[in-house]
Amino acid sequence: MSELQQKESQWKSVYIFGGVAAILSLVAVVADIVIGSSTGGNLSQLPQTAVERFSQFQQNAWLGLYNLDLLNAVNQLISIPVYFALYAALRKTNKPYAMFGLIIFLLGTTIFVANNTALPMLELSNKYAAAEEPQKAMLAAAGEAMLARGEHGSLGSFFSFLLPTLAALMMSLVMVQGNIFSKANAYIGIVGNALMLIYVILVTFAPAVKDMAMAFAMPGGLLLLVWMILFTIRLFTLGNSRDGN
């Protein structure tokens, strides 16, 4: 009996740790919304070439890093304990699918962080600013290669955004099956993640309608914010409960 209680106590610490990480992730999401709104949030207004990116870095390095999804990459790492806590909470509801959702999220996070070009582009920008004219063409070409691999909306970054969104959608679907999280929490997550999935597909495969895609991203992002708030509260409740329910 004491061994069982010890195991449940360990899971409770996972819930609390996941809840704390979820708060940090929420802060990052709110920061993303605020920064995106203050800078226009218009994908077509972003620098389109490597040289334009280099120029933006020299004018405002933080904005250049933000526009290349550094904040999103950091948030992906912060969210690892969150998804492990969601798996822990949902393991008694549908362990195979909860585990599958966690694996998809970890795979997506790995691809996202590995493909993120924010810091390499900053380094290239500094070299470009100090380079002689013959070297600038080579650095610009290197920058274009970086953008093809990790620019927001590029084919190279498609799976970086697709997999975490699918993982969140899967976790929401598992939430519906049990009574650990409320049905409202589950359905808000399903709708929010479905809208974000549409946004990711549109900005990747229909560049001409990138700005229209924001019509899906804005409500989707707000719904995901509510989804995160609700499951964060529930994680703390699970972590502080006597029986872990």
Image: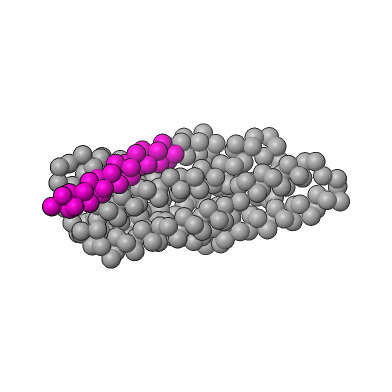
Is residue 14 shown left or right of residue 218? left
Is residue 128 shown left or right of residue 192? right
Q: Quadrant of residue 93?
A: bottom left
Residue 181 magenta-drawn?
A: no
Give the camera-side residue of 81 and 138.
81
Residue at image location 40% in from the left, 53% down from the top: 196
Residue 99 versus residue 117 in the image, above or below: below
Residue 40, percent across and down?
Answer: 53, 38
Residue 48 versus residue 61 in the image, above or below: below
Residue at image location 55% in from the left, 36% down from the top: 39
Secondary structure mainly formed by the magenta segment: helix
**Outermost residue toward the left?**
1
Is residue 64 shown left or right of residue 131? left
Residue 74 versus residue 88 in the image, above or below: above
Residue 242, percent across and down?
Answer: 15, 42
The total number of labels drawn is: 0
**Outermost residue toward the front?**
2
Question: How is the rendered protein coloured?
Answer: one colour
Residue 185, percent across and down?
Answer: 24, 48
Residue 13 magenta-drawn?
A: yes
Is residue 198 visible to us here? Answer: no
Residue 32, percent across and down?
Answer: 47, 39
Give the camera-side residue of 86 and 198.
86
Is residue 239 visible to us here? Answer: yes
Residue at image location 20% in from the left, 58% down from the top: 92
**First to last magenta residue range:** 1-29
